[in-house]
Image: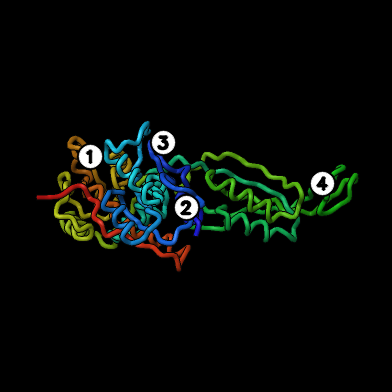
Amino acid sequence: MKLSQITAALEEVAPLSLQESYDNSGLLIGSYSKEIYKALITLDVTEEVINEALKENCELIIAHHPMIFTGIKKITGSNLTERLIIKAIKNDIAVYAIHTNLDNVAQGVNKKLAEKLGLEKLQILKAGKSELKKLVTFCPLKHMEKVRTAMFEAGAGHIGNYSDCSFNTSGTGSFKALDGSDPFVGEQGKIHLEDEIRIETIVPDYRMSKVLKAMNDAHPYEEVAYDIYPLRNSDPTTGAGMIGEIKQAETATDFLKNVKKILGTPFLRHSPLIQQKVKKVAICGGSGSFLIDAAQEAGADVFITGDIKYHDFFEHNNKMTIVDAGHFETEQFTKDLLYDILKQKFPTFALRISVTNTNPVTFL
């Protein structure tokens, strides 16, 4: 299949517009028109990963972390990034990264980590930059279901754990078709009155263009009237981190022993353990120290992430236990997530999860 089909499926789940400003997600090497027969999924792109792709005849590497972060003025092989670029291009291997945009969606990195840790009643910890809009359109009564369904299928109408949400009111629309028009109902030069339905629904800003296209394609009118209203509501489906609850409260020691086992790590760095039993847990795969305050404000007993600095462990002492479980360790299940996303969309497409351990941190 075309590389563009694969990237479109990934960006349907994690739109590129949701990546952080410092990030570089998307197609890094290759052409969207390239034919892809097999893809390799990894957390990081290393020379060993490229060798694995070559060995397994994979034309595409899908990585969580971008191999190119900053601007490159020359490619001479003087550093690791340049050598990786040269090797990928020489061997005609495309490279795609899906990083903070996959972190910032409700079905992304943190959802997968939360499931592995057995968390329930999940919510985004800190709402992201995505804006919600209200979309209003008007159509003949007989075409209401077709238009509304098309909008829902394109991504409109989601509020929390509910889908297909809309408000509908009936009324009378009026218009006069002018020269050059081809009216669906009525005649040129005459004012026409039509019984119509006003459809109101919620649309995330990053889904708006797709929803508008679906709406216009399904609508019977030659010219479709619609309004878009900005809202001050936050979008609960996008943002950083996640918070949930474990099934049964347990001591911090017992809970962290279980976390250690699930993540397969020999060590957990943490602040002093809280005395009360753990019930509410906040998480952030990768580097999440910027969410420490948000986790405490949300009432978390424990906050699990990676890359915690020394002074960060002093935050919220005795109120919340802060755990550094490792960057790689808290993101390791992302490979399974990407595999599941693509297998659901393309059941017969050849996918391989990389067996190369790209964790640069080892323990003595």
Q: CA distance from mark 1 to mark 3?
A: 29 Å
Q: Which residue type does callout 1 highlight?
A: His
Residue placed most toward the observer, 224 or 49: 49
| Residue 7 tag number | 2
Out of 278 and 28, give the one closest to the viewer. 28
In the rendered image, residue 150, in percent from the top left (x then y), is placed at 63, 57
Marks 4, 3: nearer the viewer:
3
Label 4 environment density (alpha carbons within 10 Å; few <14, some 14–19, many ≥20) = few
Helix, strand or loop at label 2? It is helix
Residue ID for mark 4 = 174
| Distance (Cα) linking label 3 and label 2 | 20 Å
Of circles 4 and 1, the one toward us is 4
Of the residues shown, which amino acid type is indicated by label 2?
Thr
Image position of 26 (left or right of 362): right
Q: Is residue 296 visible to us here?
A: no
- Count of marks overlaid on the render: 4
**From mark 4 to mark 2, how far is it between C-alphas?**
43 Å
Real-space CA distance between mark 4 and mark 3, rounded to the nearest whole angstrom: 45 Å
Mark found first going from the N terminus, 3 or 2? 2
Dot 1: few (<14), some (14–19), or many (≥20) neighbours within 10 Å?
A: some
Residue type highlighted by circle 4: Ser
Looking at the rendered structure, the kind of residue marked 3 is: Ser
Q: Are marks 4 and 3 in contact (CB under 8 Å)?
A: no
Q: Label 2 neighbourhood size at 10 Å, few (<14), some (14-19), many (20+)?
A: some
Which disc number belongs to residue 21? 3
Secondary element at image label 4 = strand
Which residue is tagged 1? 316
- Residue at x 60%, y 50% (from the top left corner): 211
